[in-house]
Amino acid sequence: MASTFKTLLGDDVVNTRTMLHEAIPITGTISSGTYQNTPGTELNIKTFSHGMFESVYDYPYLSSSANHIFDVTYGHSPAASSSAYNQNSKKTNIYNQMAQVLMGYNVSGNIRTFDSDGLLDDASGVMNQCFFLNFSRLLAKDEIKKNSFRLKIHTSGTVAANGSERANLLTLGDYKSANEFRTSPAGDYGLIFTNSAGAGAANSASIGLVFYQAGIAVLSSSIFVDEFGPPGSTDLGTWDGSGNYTSTGVDMAQTGSTIENLSAGFRHRLNDINFNNTIELNSTIYFCRVNHNEFNYSSNPTFVSGSKLVVKSNVNDLPLTYITTIGLYSSDNEMLAVAKLSEPIRKDPNTELTLRVRLDY
């Protein structure tokens, strides 16, 4: 326990904030076939009895090594609902819940619809039918870094000419969000475009939103140019053992398709997802200043032997100590934190030191 203390002044304490980023790549094979035994059986995809979303894991979800990656689901607004649609109430509830949390309410007290132009006027760019990607906190951390979100997806189920993959690969991203983004009840969000040219190009209208702090991407179902279904589905088309799909011409969004079927079909069109997450690291830095006439003696009993300082060979030698530890105390001298130096630092009356202590939280 220390016997002498030195008070930290206002200039000795500084608060800082640092943003740490980590690149997150999610390959399409994770969501569509890495652990597929047979078409329709995917060990890393967890479904639920309520049938309202699917969860994607990086390993078979029953494995102790499995990490939750993201959830995928589908919903449509009351304006696009019909009692004839399968799971119509669930699809509407999903849309309303997402919109309530992410978009909030308008001045009339009604839930706002998702608006691809970000103007929140519900007059144009309204997305009534949406797919939702909810990324786990393990990946998104405190938030998704702006202008880093990229998603490649096949917008057509047609097989490419070489027969190796589906055609119409589109790269979506929040290209303009570094300098232009909006704010919602869930935090900042940006518009998702089909290329970096922005909304000015005919083929580059905003087709979705990415909510950075919430870690959620919302995509309009209008990006798809034809129908699709999951492996093993019979009402939406036919899948073969190689993962190829033949459509039967059924509308993917407003038919008897279940949410699980729509979610599975969406997953199987993903090529890859990339973004940088963000960790907000708050720090308090303490500058512990040691003047030339301070801390040249130690209260450690081993500092003295036979009434003599063990560090002095004769009476004319300077007192000498080695600083190894810094303690931070409260106003009533209760120890709050301890910092250890990487190596002892020599201290005598001819030297002055400034030791920098950082607390991260």
Image: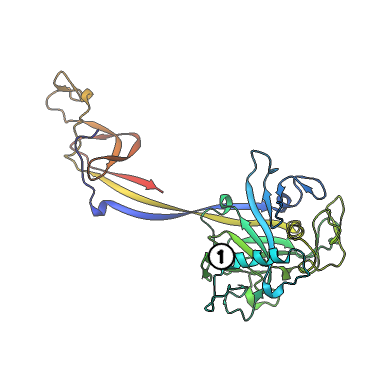
Q: Is residue 110 shown above or below 258?
A: below
Q: Is residue 174 visible?
A: no
272 in relation to 91, above or below: above
Colouring: rainbow
Q: Please indicate whether residue 360 sits to the left or right of residue 219 in the image.
A: left
Pick whichever, 201 or 346, lies toward us. Answer: 201
Q: Is 263 rendered above or below residue 1?
A: below
- As shown in the figure, which amino acid type bears the numbered disc 1? Val
The single residue placed furthest to the bottom in the displayed view is: 123
Q: Which residue in the protein does label 1 denote?
A: 101
Q: Quadrant of residue 346?
A: top left
Q: Quadrant of the N terminus?
A: top left
Name the residue: 23% across, 51% down. Answer: 9
Occupied quadrant, residue 266 = bottom right
Count how many numbered circles sit on residues in the image. Answer: 1
Residue 118 appears in the picture as rendered? yes
Residue occupying image coordinates x 84% and y 67%: 250
Which of 353/117 is in front? 117
Secondary element at tag 1: helix
Residue 228: x, y in percent? 80, 62
Packing grade of label 1 (10 A; few <14, some 14-19, many >=20) is: some
Q: Is residue 201 above or below residue 152?
A: below
Seen at 21% across and 24% down, the residue is 301
Q: Residue 57's x, y, as percent?
A: 67, 47
Q: Position of residue 306 (x, y in %)?
A: 15, 18
Residue 125, quarter of the rendered image: bottom right
Task: Give the farthest residue toward the top.
Answer: 306
